[in-house]
Image (cartoon, grey):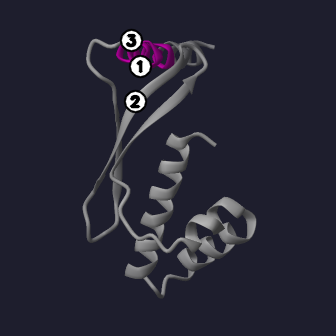
Amino acid sequence: MSSDADEIGAAVVSDLRRATGRFPDDRHLAALVRDLRTTSARFDELWGSGAVGAHREAHKTIHHPAVGPVTVDCDVLSDGDAELKIVVLTTVPGSEDDSKFRLALLAGVHDTREHARG
């Protein structure tokens, strides 16, 4: 697993641990954690670290079938109390990744139009 994936995984698990502290009586959340700990050794290891936090930002490489790998900044916006999150993916303006990201958006629009006509 890459260090980016390790960092993102650790951040997501610590965010989930934070949610279980905020909602200790949520049976669905408890079941999710129990299932993940049973089926994923990596999750169990991260959960066992005891880290608590909020997943806010990271860099991620997305592999798009039409344009290849695109590195994006991934920011997580949260409203706080309701635990609702919005994930925003951006690229550096004018960069190669920005061009690929825009091409990926156009490829998606093109595919949608083709399916609509078919």
Residue 38 part of the magenta-drawn span? no
Distance from disc 1 to disc 2, alpha carbons, whole Å, reads 9 Å
> Residue visible at 33% across and 13% down?
95
State the residue position of label 2: 72
Badge 2 crowding class, 10 Å Cα cut-off, few under 14, some 14 to 19, many 20 or more, is some
Q: Secondary structure at mark 3?
A: helix
State which quarter of the image contains the C terminus. top right
Q: Amino acid at mark 3?
A: Glu
Badge 1 crowding class, 10 Å Cα cut-off, few under 14, some 14 to 19, many 20 or more, is many
* Front residue of this view, candidates 57 and 50: 50
Q: Amino acid at mark 1?
A: Phe
* Front residue of this view, candidates 59 and 105: 59
Q: Amino acid at mark 2?
A: Val
> Residue visible at 50% across and 41% down?
4
Q: Which residues are magenta?
A: 97-109
- Residue 101 is marked as 1
Rendered image quadrant of residue 99 = top left
